[in-house]
Amino acid sequence: MLFDSHAHYDDEKFQDDRDDIIKKAYEEGVSYILNAASDIDTSLTSMDLAQKFDFVYAAVGVHPHSASTMDESTIARITEMVRSPKVVAIGEIGLDYYYDYSPKDVQKYWFKRQLELAIELSMPVIIHDRDAHEDIINIMKESKISQVGGVMHCFSGSREMAKILLDMGFFLSFGGPVTFKNAKKAIDVLQYVPMDRMLIETDSPYLSPEPLRGKRNDSRNVRLVAEKIAEIKGLDFETIASETLNNARRLFGI
Ligand code: NI
């Protein structure tokens, strides 16, 4: 039993076989999938998928890439969506200074606003951080987001950054990059993060683990991530699978 805590089945790369892949993942031992949204359209798709499949849950929210499309009516729509019982988190939200698709100030403004909303609605958050560690941490602290908690998705920071997030009560989620040949930092962090604060994910269709790197990813490959973590932590696969599943259920109230 595995919990893929972050996937994007709304993505057009799944347009021809979305339902098949989701069903296959379930048949092959992925007992839960959380579909993370990137904007209002994908939030709606995320909810549709959660409606269709018992074991799929939805996150709703706007990714930093699309921050400049937001206004207060977007916040009102997210608020509305959260009423659905299958919506279990706000995300993914955050900052992305690598691509900079939306201006930094705009990204920061809507990141803060969505954190505020998560607190108001008592929902955990799924955070995306690319090359924005310092601003992310500062905003998280100012917003007092530890009240509701959440997860740093596809964690790529250092041990120091991990400590700050763990101290704030956050979970850290690991995906395909832990299997990459240059994963030195991730391996160091994995040795440090306690088992009860770790989640696993695929970020499908992106970030396929080795030996599938570069191919379209899907939730079945979360197994490869769990196997790699088991190897790094010197624990057996079943322990990693069940602990990360329990952690995700606890965080998302499933
Ligand atoms: Ni994602």
Image (cartoon, rainbow, N blue to C red):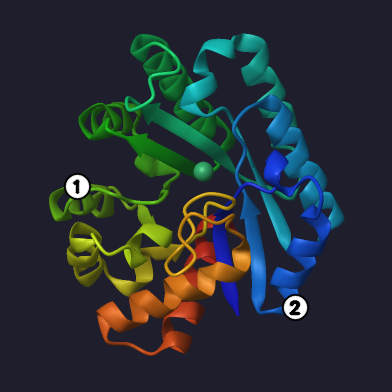
Quadrant (top left, top right, bottom left, bottom right) of the N terminus: bottom right
Badge 2 amino acid: Glu
User: What residue is pinned by disc 2?
Assistant: 27
Exactly how many numbered labels are in the figure? 2
Q: Residue at x 51, y 18 (%)?
A: 67
State the mark number for residue 201: none
Compared with 77, 161 (above or below) is below
Please state if 14 lies on the left or on the right of 220 as rendered. right
Q: Regarding mark 2 in the picture, which secondary structure is present there?
A: helix
Q: CA distance from mark 2 to mark 1?
A: 37 Å
Residue 21, quarter of picture: bottom right
Label 2–label 1 contact, CB within 8 A: no
* Secondary element type, mark 1: helix
- Within 10 Å of disc 2 (Cα), the crowding (few <14, some 14-19, many 20+) is few
Q: Residue at x 42, y 47 (%)?
A: 149
**Ligand 1 closer than 8 Å to label 2 CB:** no
Location of mark 1 (residue): 161
Q: Is residue 33 left or right of residue 169?
A: right
Residue 12: percent from the left, percent from the top?
Answer: 71, 39
Residue 77 coordinates in the image, percent (x, y): 71, 22
Could one spot residue 52 in this view of the protein?
yes
Give the x, y percent position of residue 92.
52, 38
Relative vertical location of residue 218 with respect to residue 100 in this rendering, above or below: below
